[in-house]
Amino acid sequence: MLEEEAKALNEFILSVIDSLGQLEVLLLLRAHPDRTWNAKEVSDELRTNPAAATGHLESLFHHGLLFYSDQPAPLYRYQPQSGAMTKAVDVVAQAYRDDRLRVISLIYSKPIDRLRIFADAFKIRKEDTPS
């Protein structure tokens, strides 16, 4: 893998991909770019929970990777908003085919949500009150 592609892979996973399930949803839709999918169809195809499929689809849509239509029900189709996004997904797809372990390791080695850590530091904890 070229250095440029490795950088694109790392950046895409850090900024977009939160789980292996989410990546698999993206790659499924990418493999069928002319088809629209609902969450149940995705969950049936990947043998996953429909609620998880819904969350993954919504997240990918909000990242600008999917087309969304709510007529007659929520439907999604692979349609990145830019050529750069298409190229980034292509790099991820190729890396997942060639070195699946590397991609999975990148996903699971992402830094813990810094915002949650920051917020947790300021939680007010109820102190024991005397009776």
Image: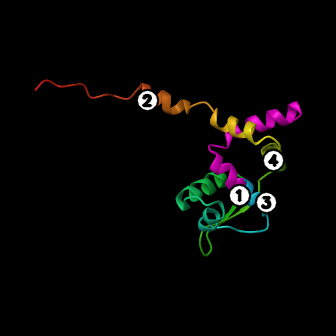
Instruction: State the image coordinates of residue 75 (x, y, percent, origin top left).
Output: 65, 67
Q: Which mark is residue 97?
A: 4
Q: CA distance from mark 2 to mark 3?
A: 40 Å
Please name the residue that numbered disc 1 is placed on.
Answer: 66
Vertical position of residue 91 compared to residue 56: above or below: above
Residue at the outermost bottom position: 72
Query: The residue under label 1 is which amino acid type?
Result: Leu
Q: What residue do we see at 71% from left, 68% from top? A: 36
- Tell me the mark number nearer the camera, choosing from 3 and 1: 3
Q: Amino acid at mark 2?
A: Asp
* Secondary element type, mark 3: helix
Quarter of the image where one finds residue 84:
top right
Q: Using the numbered discs, state the Cα–Cα distance from disc 4 to disc 1 in whole angstroms.
A: 21 Å
Label 1: element kind: strand
Distance (Cα) linking label 4 and label 2: 38 Å
Q: Residues within 10 Å of mark 1 (few under 14, many from 20)?
A: many
Reply yes or no: does residue 2 show up in magenta. yes
**Residue visible at 73% across and 58% down?**
28
Dot 2 or dot 1, earlier in sequence: 1
Horizontal placement of 53 versus 122: left or right?
right
Q: CA distance from mark 4 to mark 3?
A: 13 Å
**Residue kind at label 3, given as amino acid type:** Ala
User: Start and end of the magenta stretch?
Assistant: 1-26
Q: Are marks 2 and 3 in contact (CB under 8 Å)?
A: no
Residue 108 at x, y = what percent? 63, 36
Whether label 4 touches label 2, CB < 8 Å: no
Q: Amino acid at mark 4?
A: Arg
Q: Circle 2 sits on which residue?
A: 120
